[in-house]
Image (cartoon, rainbow, N blue to C red):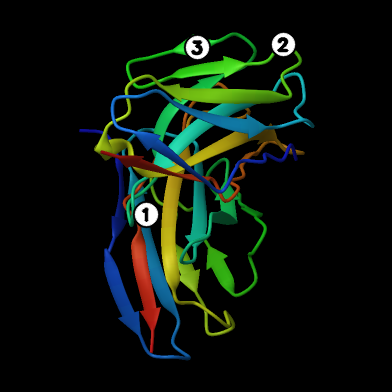
């Protein structure tokens, strides 16, 4: 079955450590996105990528980094510069450059807790 | 970016229609309206989208006003499993090649017996 997979589902890290969240899709989608969600809040866009080796900052990119070396993979690194990293992180993908008439598919999320 | 405004919460009795409103008064002519829902601690689920005509699928109906400044998502016979946060978003073609998906805070729909 085609879909988008995030791993792990739960992640614990010590303060000051970098951590990388995985996102893989087998939908052959060009565009991928990372969102952060805090309790009782909506989704905020961290980074997005339209094609391989290209990505843009979203609304809250500080303290995060991404790479897009392969079409199917868009890992997110939460760096020690991110002041409040504990959150629920969601990855999404969509088809096609500029195709506004296509829906996004979401992974099931990674809940990151920094202690 | 076109922004959306939704009521923070709504209640609906099971079996009745749930009508969820959304304002998007700054929407541009080529921007689609999308609806998603999110059940607690899961990834958002696509429901429906439209440009200017009303749309219907097996989950819901989408009514878009003629001026496209607002829309309503209709769940015709709400069940307890429809309890979720519902997001109305406008898919924006940003500068360059990328297209953003920007979410607001959504409407928390509580379906009750």
The crowd level at tag 3 (other Cα within 10 Å; few <14, some 14-19, many 20+) is some
Callout 3: SS: strand
In this picture, is A98 found above or below A8?
Answer: above
- Indicate left or right for A88 with B71 as reference: left
In this picture, is A86 found above or below A75?
Answer: below
Callout 2: SS: loop
Callout 1: SS: strand
Q: Pointer 1: what residue?
A: A23
Labels 3 and 2 within one chain: yes
The crowd level at tag 2 (other Cα within 10 Å; few <14, some 14-19, many 20+) is few
* Contact check, label 2 and label 1, Cβ < 8 Å: no
Q: Pointer 3: what residue?
A: B55
| The image quarter in which residue B89 lies | top right
Labels 1 and 3 within one chain: no
Q: Pointer 2: what residue?
A: B66
Confirm whether residue A67 shows in the render. no
| x and y percentages locating residue A30 in the rendered image | 49, 36
* Contact check, label 1 and label 3, Cβ < 8 Å: no
The crowd level at tag 1 (other Cα within 10 Å; few <14, some 14-19, many 20+) is many
| x and y percentages locating residue A91 in the rendered image | 43, 51
- Indicate left or right for A65 with B69 as reference: left
Output the chain of dot 1.
A
Give me the residue at 67% from left, 58% from top: A59
- How far, Cα to Cα, is label 3 from label 2? 13 Å
| x and y percentages locating residue B27 in the rendered image | 75, 28
Output the chain of dot 2.
B
Hey, which residue is sitting farthest left in the picture? A1
- How far, Cα to Cα, is label 2 from label 1? 39 Å
In this picture, is A14 found above or below B111?
Answer: below
- How far, Cα to Cα, is label 1 from label 3? 32 Å
Labels 2 and 1 within one chain: no
């Amino acid at each position: 079955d085609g879909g988008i997979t995030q791993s792990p589902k739960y992640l614990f890290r010590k303060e000051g450590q970098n951590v990388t969240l995985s996102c893989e899709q087998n939908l052959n989608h060009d565009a991928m996105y990372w969102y952060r969600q805090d309790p009782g809040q909506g989704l905020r866009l961290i980074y997005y990528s339209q094609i391989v080796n290209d990505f843009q900052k979203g609304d809250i990119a500080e303290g995060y980094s991404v790479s897009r070396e392969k079409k199917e993979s868009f890992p997110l690194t939460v760096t020690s510069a991110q002041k409040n990293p504990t959150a629920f992180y969601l990855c999404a993908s969509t088809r096609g450059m500029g195709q506004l008439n296509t829906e996004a598919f979401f992974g099931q999320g990674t809940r990151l807790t920094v202690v | 970016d076109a922004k959306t405004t939704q009521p923070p919460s709504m209640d609906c009795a099971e079996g009745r229609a749930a009508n969820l409103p959304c304002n998007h008064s700054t929407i541009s002519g080529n921007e689609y309206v999308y609806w998603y829902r999110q059940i607690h601690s899961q990834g958002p689920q696509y429901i429906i989208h439209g440009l200017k005509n009303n749309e219907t699928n097996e989950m819901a109906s989408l009514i878009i006003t003629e001026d496209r400044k607002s829309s309503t998502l209709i769940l015709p016979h709400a069940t307890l499993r429809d309890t979720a946060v519902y997001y109305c978003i406008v898919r924006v073609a940003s500068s360059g090649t990328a297209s953003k998906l920007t979410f607001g805070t959504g409407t928390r729909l509580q379906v009750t017996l």
